[in-house]
Image (cartoon, helix red, strand yellow):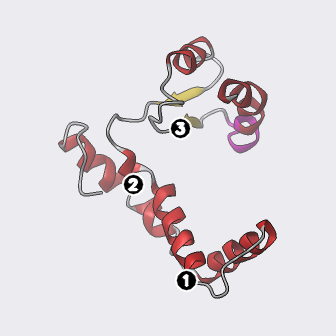
Amino acid sequence: MYLSILSDHLYSFMSIVHSDRLGQFQQDNATLHASRVATKWHQEHSSDFRHFHWPPKSPEMNIIEDIRDALLHAVEKRSPHPRTPMDLLTALKDACYEFPPGYLQTPVESMPRRFASLLLARGVPTRY
């Protein structure tokens, strides 16, 4: 299923988001992403787009997880809790609007420090 998602959607996504062809596809080292068959697929398609190699043992480098955690926390403290998918979507949208100005910029701006920390730690987990 993962390979069909890559085959069916990755090319069009990359061409829309990175029309200059300078973007890199990034994923974590989840078992599904690092499987032998997925790795082979990426190798076979390496000339079609650039693939950012995610350092092993470094899930803390993924800023999406920080943002997801903030959204989950905001939704969990709502009363009443969302009961339907539409309620959940509304709660997530509301949570996004409640973020202080510049909230999303902070994790983005932290990336150089995160990578420097990772390089110093030689790939082992860091404080990030």
| Residue drawn where x is 67% and y is 72% of the image | 92
Residue 93: percent from left, percent from top: 71, 74
Task: Bin the neighbour count of mark 1 within 10 Å (Cα to Cα): few under 14, some 14-19, many 20 and up.
Answer: few
Query: In the image, what residue type sits under mark 1?
Result: Lys
Q: Which residue is mark 3?
A: 26
Number of the label disc, if any, that sits on residue 91 = none
In terms of image quadrants, where is residue 9?
Answer: top right
Q: How far apart are the two marked residues, 3 and 1, measured between alpha carbons? A: 31 Å
Image vertical order of residue 75 relative to residue 121, above or below: below
Marks 3 and 2: which is nearer the front?
3
Q: Quadrant of the N terminus?
A: top right
First in sequence: mark 3 vs mark 1: 3
Q: Quadrant of the C terminus?
A: bottom left
In terms of image quadrants, where is residue 113?
Answer: bottom left
Dot 3 and dot 2 residues touching (CB under 8 Å):
no
Query: In the image, what residue type sits under mark 2?
Result: Met
Number of the label disc, if any, that sits on residue 111 = 2
- Secondary element type, mark 2: helix
Image vertical order of residue 92 relative to residue 26, above or below: below
| Residue drawn where x is 54% and y is 63% of the image | 68
Instruction: Identify the magenta region.
Output: 14-20
In terms of image quadrants, where is residue 14?
Answer: top right
Residue 127: percent from left, percent from top: 24, 57
Marks 3 and 1: which is nearer the front?
1
Residue 61: percent from left, percent from top: 38, 49
- Which residue reaches farthest bottom? 79
